[in-house]
Image (cartoon, grey):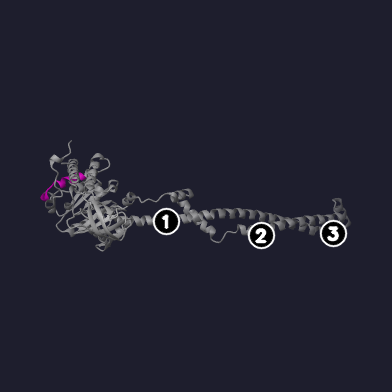
Amino acid sequence: MNATELIEGWIARLEAQQARLTETGHDAPVVASQGRLLQTSGGLHLYEFIVPADVQLSVDLPVSVVPADEEDTTEGIVLRQVGSSLAIQLVDTLGYEVPAVTLVPDQAGLVSKSASRLKDMLAKPDLYHLGPTERLALLLQMQEVEAETFPSASSVFATVWSDDRSVRRQKLGSLAMEFIRANKRILLISPNHQECDEIVGILGRTMKAGGLNHKTWITRYELPIASQAGGIDLHELGFEAQMHQFYAKSQGDKASLKHKYDRFRELAPLLSQKEAKRKDLDEVRLLEWRLVTQVRDLQVKMADVQKMLKEFENLPLFQRLTMQAVGKNAESLRQYCLLYQGQTDQLNKELDVAKGRIQQLAPEAAVPKGNRAEFEELKEHITKLGGAKKVRELLAAEEHPNRQAFIQNRRVVAATPTRVASDPLFSRVRFDVLMVDEAPRIAAPLLLAAAGLIRERIIVSGDPREIAALEQWAMPQPASRVAQ
C-alpha cells in the first residue's frame, strides 16, 4: 500500500470504531470523588480525581466535568491515570477541593477527530505533505525484522533503533541540536505525557550543555505531569505558561506605552503654548531693543544740541551765520531740545509698557526643567513606532492570545500524538522535522496524522521488538477500505 491507500484503510477502521463506540454506549458517565487542584499554569488547571477501580480512561481523552450541583460544567483532557488516580487538565477552575464530580468521556468524539484529520490530508493535498509520509507508510507495514533493516534515506527518513532507551534518546537529543542550529522547526511526539516529560528533560539538558537557551527553543504542549526532568524545570517550558508570560509582558509593555503616550499628549499642548508665549516674548524683547536704541539715539542728539547751545555765543561769527542759514540758532536749538525730550519721554513710556509685558510673559514662556528633554525623548519613541496615529491603533487593538502565532515561534514543540491528531491548532501549523520517541508504542493512524504536518524529514526511534508485541501498527483488513 502507498500512503494514500494506508490512510484510507485507517479512516475506514476509525469510522467503524466510532460507530461501535456509539452503539455500545462506551462513553458512559463516571462518578469521581476527592478532587483536588494540583497546579495552575496560565489558563489551565491540573486536577486529580479518584475514580472506581474498574474505570480505565485513555490518555488525552476529552471529558466533560459536571460538578454535583450541575453548575459551572467545564471541559478537560485526561493526562494520566495511575490506578484509581486520574489527572485531568481543565480549562476552568473548580476550586482547590472538589467533593464529587461526574466525568462524561468522549472516546467516540476523539476517534472522530483523528479520522477527520486523516480525511483532510487526502482531501486537501496542497495543505499537507505526503512525501515523507510515503516512507513512513512503508515502515508501518513491515514486521520487526524488516523494520530493523529498513533502509532510511538520510534526507527524508531515518530510524534510531536500539533496545537501550537512554541511548536512542541521547541520539534524538543530538539530532535535535543539529536541526535547531540549521533553523529547522521540530515536532517531537511521545506515546504519553510522562514519556513526553522525560524526552523534553533530556532535550533541554542537551541544549543547555550545548550553550543554547532551552527556555527559548522548547515548548511542552499541555501541562507537564512532572515538575522536573533531567534537572530541567518543566513548568517553565509549558506552552500555556510561556504564552501567559509572553502576553503578560505584552500587556505590561502596552500599559507602559499608554503611560508614555498620555504623558506625550500632556506635554505636547503645554510646550506648544510655551512656544507661542516664547515667540511673543521674543517679539516684545525685540521691540524693547528697538525702543532703547531710539532713546539712545535721541539722547545723543540732545547732548549734541545742548553742547552747541553752550558754545553758540562763543562760536565765530562766520560759523553762526552759516548755522542760521540752515535754521539753526539759539531759539531753534532750544526747540530741538524740547522736541527730543518729548520724543524720549514717549519712548520711555512705551519701554515701560514693554518691560511690563516682558515681566508677564517671562514666567508664562518658561519651560519646567527637564520637560523639554522628556518630550523630545517621548516624541522620538513614538516616531519610531510609526507616529501618534499608529500608537493609538496599537492601544485601541484588543489583545487576544494568538496560539498559532506563538507556537510557530518555537523551534521544538513536544506533544503526544493524540493531541497532534485531535487538536485543531496542529492542523494550522507545519514543521520541518518529525521526531518520534517510542514509535512502536504509538498507533499507526496517529503517526500518519503527525507525518502529514512535516515538510522535510521524519526520524523514528524505539525498540523494534515492540512492533510485533504491541501491534500498534497492525494493518487494516482490505475489506475495511473505503470504496474507490
Q: Secondary structure at mark 3?
A: helix
Q: Say which of marks 3 and 1 sits in front.
A: 1
Q: Residues within 10 Å of mark 3 (few under 14, many from 20)?
A: some
Q: Which amino acid type is marked by label 2?
A: Gln
From which residue to which does the magenta span run?
133-145
Question: Residue most toward the top?
Answer: 484
Relative to the observer, which residue lies in front, 91 or 218?
Answer: 91
Magenta span includes 221: no
Q: Is residue 325 left or right of residue 154?
A: right
Please say if 408 is above or below 356.
above
| Visible residue check, residue 40 | yes
Which of the two discs, 1 and 2, labels the residue nearer the N terminus?
Answer: 1
Q: Which mark is residue 253?
A: 1
Q: Image point 86% across, 51% down: which residue? A: 325
For the N terminus, give its image quadrant: top left
Q: First in sequence: mark 3 or mark 2? A: 3
For disc 1, the neighbor class at 10 Å (few under 14, some 14 to 19, many from 20) is few
Kindly give the residue lying farthest to the left in the view shown.
Answer: 145
* CA distance for labels 3 and 2: 40 Å
Q: Magenta-highlighted stretch: main secondary structure?
A: helix
Residue linked to disc 3? 309
Disc with the residue nearer the chain's start (3 vs 1): 1
Q: Which residue is mark 2?
A: 359
